Image (tube, grey):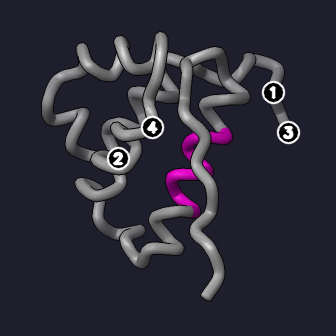
């Protein structure tokens, strides 16, 4: 059996780290067969916040913290891509 896709701790340093974190959470959820379980994804993501991102996450409303769809939007709102990022 292959090993689980790695997920690096998200520190909140910027867009590129945010994008990598979102993709890593999605990949891990798919690997676990949990890609349709928003609460599982949000809970798993919560175990991987540190530093600035941990403080930010702790202050989010509970409904956002428990729902990956809402948490993903909150991440992208806080650490958006650059305006000229067309890649």
Q: Is residue 10 left or right of residue 48?
A: right
Q: Which residue is mark 3?
A: 87
Check disc 1 and report its element: helix, strand or loop. Answer: loop
Tell me the quadrant of the picture where the C terminus can be found.
Answer: top right
Q: Residue at x 72, y 28 (%)?
A: 16
- Which tag, 4 or 3, sits closer to the chain's start? 4
Magenta segment range? 20-27
Q: Please report the residue visible at 24 percent of the width from the left and 14 percent of the height from the top.
A: 59
Q: Position of residue 18 (x, y in %)?
A: 60, 31
Location of residue 67 with respect to 17 vertically, above or below: below
Disc 2, SS: helix
Sequence-wise, the earlier of marks 1 and 2 is: 2
State the mark number for residue 85. 1
Instruction: Left or right? Give the position of 73 relative to 40.
Output: right
Question: What separation in Å lies between label 3 and label 2 (alpha carbons)?
Answer: 23 Å
Mark 3 or 2 closer to N-term?
2
Q: Residue at x 52, y 58 (%)?
A: 26
Mark 1 neighbour class, 10 Å CA radius: few under 14, some 14 to 19, many 20 or more: few
Element assignment for label 3 = loop
| Label 1 – label 3 distance at C-alpha | 6 Å
From the image, tell me which residue sits under label 2: 69
The x, y position of residue 68, in whole percent, is 34, 47
Secondary structure mainly formed by the magenta segment: helix
Distance from the alpha carbon under mark 1 to that under mark 4: 26 Å
Q: Earlier in the sequence, mark 1 or mark 4?
A: 4
Q: Which mark is residue 48?
A: 4
Q: Quadrant of the N terminus?
A: bottom right
* Cβ atoms at labels 4 and 3 below 8 Å apart: no
Up-down relation of residue 15 to residue 46 (above or below)? above
| C-beta proximity under 8 Å, tags 1 and 3 | yes
Q: Going 82% across and 20% down the picture, which residue do you hit?
A: 84
């Amino acid at each position: 059996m292959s090993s689980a896709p790695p997920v690096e701790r998200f520190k909140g340093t910027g867009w590129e780290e945010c994008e990598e974190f979102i993709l890593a959470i999605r990949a891990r959820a798919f690997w676990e067969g949990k890609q349709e379980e928003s609460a599982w994804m949000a809970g798993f993501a919560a175990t991987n916040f540190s530093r600035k991102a941990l403080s930010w996450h702790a202050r989010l409303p509970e409904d956002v913290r428990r729902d990956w769809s809402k948490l993903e939007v909150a991440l992208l709102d806080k650490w958006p891509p650059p305006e000229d990022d067309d890649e």
